[in-house]
Image (cartoon, rainbow, N blue to C red):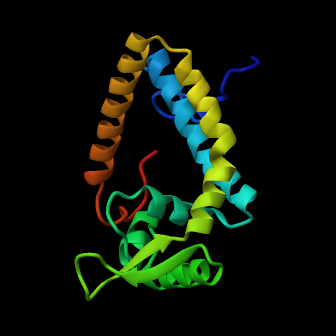
């Protein structure tokens, strides 16, 4: 039958496993639409990297540095990217050498380094993202004030749920075989 998942694509629950966010029977249309946005957001990082002519890890690092409300050092950046300290050091060295990032003193702890995205790299990222950002602003402009307020509240609540999910994840990956 066309469009139906084969028996091998289904788990014990009978739910299709074809995609990273298979459609659970109790999932609302709103939750499915949000997962679609999350998938597109993941694809956006790769597109940004291609537009900037850099690797996806480099683009992710720059994104973390630009969007972080607190200064990040190499260790914190590595933790956010899920890479080891030595890999983070290599990454930072590469970003500094390319002129994307500068090392400087941490604003509140003289013993630590802080990483800042250079003005040129910041401008390049903004220029590369501009078509997408403009499209999002156009979509927002089509909302009524009440729709915009409800959407904002919903997205903030979802972000809080996602941050809680991240905060409660184990520090180390599970060992042993994963259940089917």
Q: Quadrant of residue 59?
A: bottom right
The residue sitting at 61% across, 81% down in the picture is: 94
Q: Is 174 placed left or right of 19 in the picture?
A: left
Residue 81 seen in this snapshot = yes
Q: Quadrant of residue 106?
A: bottom left
Q: Nearer the viewer, residue 93 or 131?
A: 131
Q: Where residue 14 sits in the image (x, y, percent)?
A: 51, 26
Up/down of 33 relative to 128, above or below: above
Q: Where residue 46 sits in the image (x, y, percent)?
A: 66, 54
Q: How many marks?
A: 0
Up/down of 27 relative to 155, above or below: above
Q: Where residue 87 sits in the image (x, y, percent)?
A: 51, 81
Quarter of the image where the N terminus is located: top right
Q: Residue furthest bottom?
A: 111
The residue sitting at 29% across, 64% down in the picture is: 171
The residue sitting at 42% across, 70% down in the picture is: 77
Q: Nearer the viewer, residue 141 or 4?
A: 141
Up/down of 40 relative to 126, above or below: above
Q: Is 29 placed left or right of 166 in the picture?
A: right
Up/down of 28 relative to 100, above or below: above
Q: Is 73 placed left or right of 89 in the picture?
A: left
Q: Where residue 9 sits in the image (x, y, percent)?
A: 62, 35
Q: Nearer the viewer, residue 77 or 132?
A: 132
Residue 14 seen in this snapshot = no
């Amino acid at each position: 039958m066309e469009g139906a998942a084969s028996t091998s694509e289904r788990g014990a629950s009978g739910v299709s496993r074809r995609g990273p966010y298979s459609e659970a029977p109790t999932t609302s249309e709103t939750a499915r639409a949000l997962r679609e946005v999350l998938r597109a957001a993941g694809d956006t990082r790769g597109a940004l990297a291609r537009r900037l002519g850099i690797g996806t890890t480099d683009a992710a690092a720059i994104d973390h540095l630009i969007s972080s409300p607190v200064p990040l050092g190499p260790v914190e950046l590595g933790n956010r990217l899920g890479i080891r300290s030595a890999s983070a050091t290599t990454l930072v060295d590469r970003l500094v050498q390319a002129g994307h990032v500068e090392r400087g003193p941490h604003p509140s702890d003289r013993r630590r380094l802080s990483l800042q995205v250079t003005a040129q790299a910041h401008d390049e990222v903004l220029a590369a993202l501009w078509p997408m950002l403009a499209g999002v602003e156009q979509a927002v402009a089509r909302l009524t004030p009440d729709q915009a307020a409800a959407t904002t509240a919903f997205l903030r609540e979802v972000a809080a749920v996602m941050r809680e999910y991240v905060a409660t994840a184990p520090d180390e990956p599970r060992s042993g075989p994963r259940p089917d």
